Image (cartoon, grey):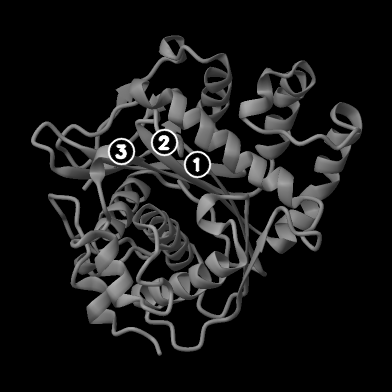
Amino acid sequence: MMPNTQDQSRFAKRAEPISVIIPPQMSVWHPLVDPQVGYLFSLSDSLRIVEANTPGFLVPVTEGTMIVASDYSGQHKEATHEAYSFLITTEPVLHDWLPSLRAFRAKWLPDNRRISFKKLNEPLRWRALPAFLEVVGRLRGNLVTIMVDRRVGSFVDGGPSAVIEVFPDCFSAEANPGTVEKMLRLASFVALILSGLRQETQISKWISDEDEALDSYQKRESFSRLATYLTFGLTGWRRPADHLFAMTGSPKVPYWSEDLTAVADIAAGAYCQMISNLPTYFGRATWRVRASSENVASERARTVGTWLARGHTSLKHVLLRLELDSNRQVRASAQAFVKAIEVPTDS
């Protein structure tokens, strides 16, 4: 039985302050309209504002089957932030781009070894990184990374116990609270991506790397139900096309799946290491600040950050953030590198 959408939203937390402005008619992003969905509304509204002020900020991904590849960073105890990164493109675009990927692999990684942010210290992968990023920059799509300050706390009033109460067919009463919160966040972000970029009648396929929230068959089944409920709560879709889900470890996933999730992994890892050098918000709807890669200690993060800052005609990127301000209020912002100038906005 599908939970009542009022039950889903009654405990959702919001980032303050909230501003509601009618979105532009030609925007790619479909902003959420109900502030009661909490932090997701705040993140969506921030992206809406920055897109309205930056023409061509995102590219449409509505022609053909949508492809979403995701990976995550900052899951260890010492991390100050968690990062959830999503690469969104379409099947026709991917089909045209794959020859470039195969040419890259034939020249730089013929042994099929995987690229990942953590393994970039290995010489062969490090030498291949610039060529890989160049190829990825030619893929038409959007790279969306969502970062959450660890001090933000639970996404809902009442915490994981309230989530278990509202979604009893997704979690047992004895479910680990930390796992429940992680599954809720990931499902919320998947629902946000789908509601913001997909059409109701558009088939979508999501490929995720391994994660604690998805490390067993039972968790994946529960997660699928939870993501379905949350997507319905955000969109109200009555007859949506199928949304298919797979893990990179599955023998049935396409060969290119690990390279797409690697893009998400590299973005998530780099943003986590750059986070102390990036601005949060300035109490205004829009603002610009200069950011320098010289202040980034990690050479890996500096390389990826420089690549993002160059900008790409095909691949667009945006960083969404939830942070605490000096009064410990949660604030949402959306930002992206544009011609060596950071162009963020907060709501």
Label located before the other in sequence (3 or 1): 3
Q: Give the labeled residue for mark 1.
A: 317
- Is residue 28 at least partly visible in the picture? no
Q: Secondary structure at mark 2?
A: loop
Label located before the other in sequence (1 or 2): 1
Query: Is the Cβ of the residue at disc 1 closer than 8 Å to that at disc 2?
Result: yes
Q: Which mark is residue 276?
A: none
Q: Secondary structure at mark 1?
A: strand
In this view, the mark in front (3 or 2): 3
- Is residue 343 at least partly visible in the picture? yes
Label located before the other in sequence (3 or 2): 3
Write down the quadrant of residue 214 in the picture.
bottom right
Q: Position of residue 192 (x, y in %)?
A: 41, 62
In three-dimensional space, the C-alpha distance between marks 3 and 1, rounded to whole angstroms, equals: 20 Å
In this view, the mark in front (3 or 1): 3
Tell me the residue at 73%/53% (across/down).
249
Q: Give the labeled residue for mark 2.
A: 336
The residue nearer to you, when weighing 327 against 174, is 174
Q: Secondary structure at mark 3?
A: strand
Vertical comparison of 90 with 52: above or below: below
In three-dimensional space, the C-alpha distance between marks 3 and 2, rounded to whole angstroms, equals: 18 Å
Q: Position of residue 174 (x, y in %)?
A: 37, 66
Extreme residue in the left direction: 327
Q: Is residue 96 left or right of residue 56?
A: right
Q: Amino acid at mark 3?
A: Asp
Vertical comparison of 264 with 253: above or below: above
Write down the quadrant of residue 310 in the picture.
top right
Q: Is residue 275 left or right of residue 140?
A: left
Q: Amino acid at mark 2?
A: Ala
Q: Give the labeled residue for mark 3.
A: 149
Tell me the residue at 70%/53% (across/down).
248
Q: Amino acid at mark 1?
A: His
